[in-house]
């Protein structure tokens, strides 16, 4: 199981909390990266108050052929519960480190290499990977 920790910011750039996205580990391949969102998320305020997000949606997908079985859903929930303990303890990344970070305005905008830059037009279809 993998987790993506995103800092949430107000439009003016002030830190607004964290968004914890539970997902599968990234799988790299020549065309890019595959990852599966595991639906259940956690929203955390700057003072480390947290709440589950998308619980009903996650519960509704248990047993669905394209989502997950009960064992996987239980593992996702257990990982989330492990993370809520980090939140409560103020452990990294919920310790406030880098919450005041702002990129230097003089830094250039990052660009993808030409071979990875999305091309205009309809998306290409790809087979599902295991």
Image: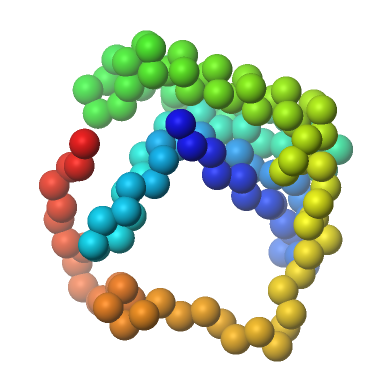
Q: Residue at x 72, y 83 (%)?
A: 105
The total number of labels drawn is 0
Q: Residue at x 79, y 55 (%)?
A: 99
> Can see residue 39?
no
Quadrant of residue 41 in the image?
top right
> Please, which colouring scheme is shown?
rainbow
Q: Residue at x 72, y 43 (%)?
A: 93
- The percent coordinates of residue 91 (x first, y second) are 78, 35
90 up-or-down from 109: above or below: above
Left or right for 83, reference 25: right
- The percent coordinates of residue 57 (x first, y second) are 44, 25
* Quadrant in the picture for the C terminus: top left
Viewer-proximal residue among 52 and 24: 24
Quadrant of residue 36 in the image?
top left
Left or right for 119, reference 44: left
Q: Residue at x 72, y 64 (%)?
A: 11
- The percent coordinates of residue 106 (x first, y second) are 70, 88
Left or right for 6, reference 77: right
- The percent coordinates of residue 92 (x first, y second) are 74, 41
Quadrant of residue 107 in the image?
bottom right
130 up-or-down from 11: above or below: above
**Residue placed farthest to the right in the image?**
47
> Can see residue 96?
yes
């Amino acid at each position: 199981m993998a987790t993506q920790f995103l800092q949430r910011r107000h439009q003016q750039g002030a830190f607004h909390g964290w968004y914890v996205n539970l997902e599968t580990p990234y799988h790299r391949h020549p065309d890019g990266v595959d990852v599966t969102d595991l639906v259940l998320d956690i929203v955390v305020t700057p003072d480390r108050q947290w709440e589950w997000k998308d619980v009903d949606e996650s519960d509704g997908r248990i047993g669905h052929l394209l989502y997950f079985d009960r064992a996987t859903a239980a593992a996702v929930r257990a990982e989330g519960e492990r993370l809520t303990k980090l939140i409560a303890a103020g452990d990294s990344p919920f310790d406030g480190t880098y919450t005041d970070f702002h990129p230097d305005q003089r830094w250039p905008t990052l660009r993808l290499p030409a071979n990875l830059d999305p091309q205009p037009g309809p998306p290409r279809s790809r087979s599902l990977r295991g």
